[in-house]
Image (tube, coloured by chain):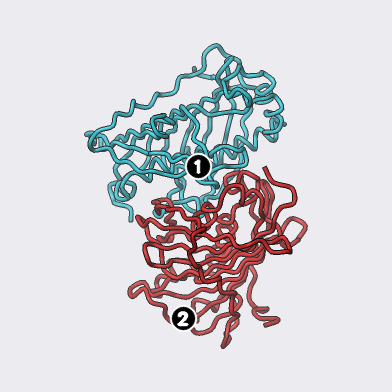
Chain colours: A red, B cyan
Amino acid sequence: MAGLGEQASIYTEEHRLTYYECDRTGRATLATLIDIAILASQDQSDALGLTTDFVQSHGVGWVVTQYAMTITRMPRLDETVTLAVRGSAYNPYFAYREFWIRDAAGQELAYITSIWVTMSQTTRRIVKIDPELVAPYHSEAVKRIPRLPRPLHFEPTEATLSKPYQVRFFDIDPNRHVNNAHYFDWLLDTLPADFLLQHNLMQVDVRYENEVKYGHTVTSEVNILPTTTDGTVTTSHRIRVGDEKCCEVTIKWQVIAEAVE
Amino acid sequence: MAGLGEQASIYTEEHRLTYYECDRTGRATLATLIDIAILASQDQSDALGLTTDFVQSHGVGWVVTQYAMTITRMPRLDETVTLAVRGSAYNPYFAYREFWIRDAAGQELAYITSIWVTMSQTTRRIVKIDPELVAPYHSEAVKRIPRLPRPLHFEPTEATLSKPYQVRFFDIDPNRHVNNAHYFDWLLDTLPADFLLQHNLMQVDVRYENEVKYGHTVTSEVNILPTTTDGTVTTSHRIRVGDEKCCEVTIKWQVIAEAVE
């Protein structure tokens, strides 16, 4: 897929990480990483006239179905990063969007790929992508878009950790949906604090299946898989509402040599 | 108190409200209002050399005990506001800090007053304010600082609404405390969605009593008092951990003539 989307427009903006976007160690949270990536993509869309209103006037809304994130280093408190986004390619049903987050020296901190669909506002079903909604990005029309890594199938065990979370009024953003970055707070908060303090994120693979709604209580579940010989750990996650699976996530972590306080 | 703190330094900065700082109606959330006000105050402190490390090197940390907020209009999605902050005055035990949030035309959107104390890191007790920690703000040394409105004493009734919230890992910010702006998500989420959609915030009076910690489950309780003839409604709130009161809050709301969707 070398060169895929090379002719697509890249939009960039700067963002300074505030204290309320960072965890107690000063690392940006995973929710923030997605929040600011999506912020850049909304700003690109607005700049190209592809506003939420314009998309809705076509009877649809964009919905993300998968993320694959490679994190070299989490941005830190007070750091100003450059966000770059590109609507790289699309086929009749799926759009492929890429994000880069770089530090002031241009070093890559994170690279995120994602798959998006358009969902009918009336039937809530996936519909063919209207080329009018992607043409301004100079997205490449292709037969096949890249496949993102599929998260591990989550298998509950006796050691599974689990916590309930009520979906809150303020989890719903101006797009009228639960901001799916909030899933990451539920996903990671289920892990013990010590684990979060002793590991850094390396790779996050997410697959969304069913929408979470205001008033739902979701169950966030996680298995911590055995540490491998290379000092990495994998966690396998699921979020469900009752028996309905909402998303599966696999995360690869690096053990931090010196424990973070 | 006319002119109190007039000689104190004012620090200003701009902030653009992002989609993830706003609710589904596009209004900034109350948590965001406090988050960005405190951001400006931390930036002022850093600019004056009063960094968290410097404060901690004196064996103390700043803790807010009261807020009184008057909100003329909540900032909205994509609006760029100007934040202004001033460490106006202090006496031996209390510091008085003011914040102004203004729109691009200079109109006041919100005015926040607050009372702060320094707490010993070892004994967790309130200690006398070291003048070194306030001198760079050009704070006025006074005998008495203004009294902020005391929230109503919360009285549970049969009609009290209540929800539990687990304090999450990501509620702890780089200052190693539960970011107290998160209290506002707990406080307001306990109200029905319809109430939140049909009312705008006018006045918020907050008094913190005991610290909330990671792992606690807090109970957020609210009474909706009868609507007054001037079309305002008052809600009386309490957050507690078991039998220990963590804060009391009184909020005055204006009924919105045209319902927000």
Along the line of sight, which residue is nearer the eye, B257 or B42? B42
The residue labelled by disc 1 is: B215
The residue labelled by disc 2 is: A130
Element type at marker 1? loop
Question: Which percent across, then down, holds residue B161?
Answer: 29, 41
Element type at marker 2? loop
Tell whether B236 sits left or right of A227. left
Question: Which percent across, then down, holds residue A79?
Answer: 69, 49
Q: CA distance from mark 2 to mark 1?
A: 47 Å
In this rendering, the label closer to the viewer, 2 or 1: 1
Question: Which percent across, then down, holds residue A112?
Answer: 62, 67
| Other-residue count near label 1 (Cα within 10 Å), few / some / many at <14 / 14–19 / ≥20 | few
Q: Mark 2 near mark 1, Cβ–Cβ under 8 Å?
A: no
Q: Amino acid at mark 2?
A: Asp
Residue A27 vertical position relative to residue B49 in the rendered view, above or below: below
Q: Which mark is residue B105?
A: none
The answer to whether marks 2 and 1 sit on the same chain is no
Q: Amino acid at mark 1?
A: Gly
Tell whether A126 sits left or right of A154. left
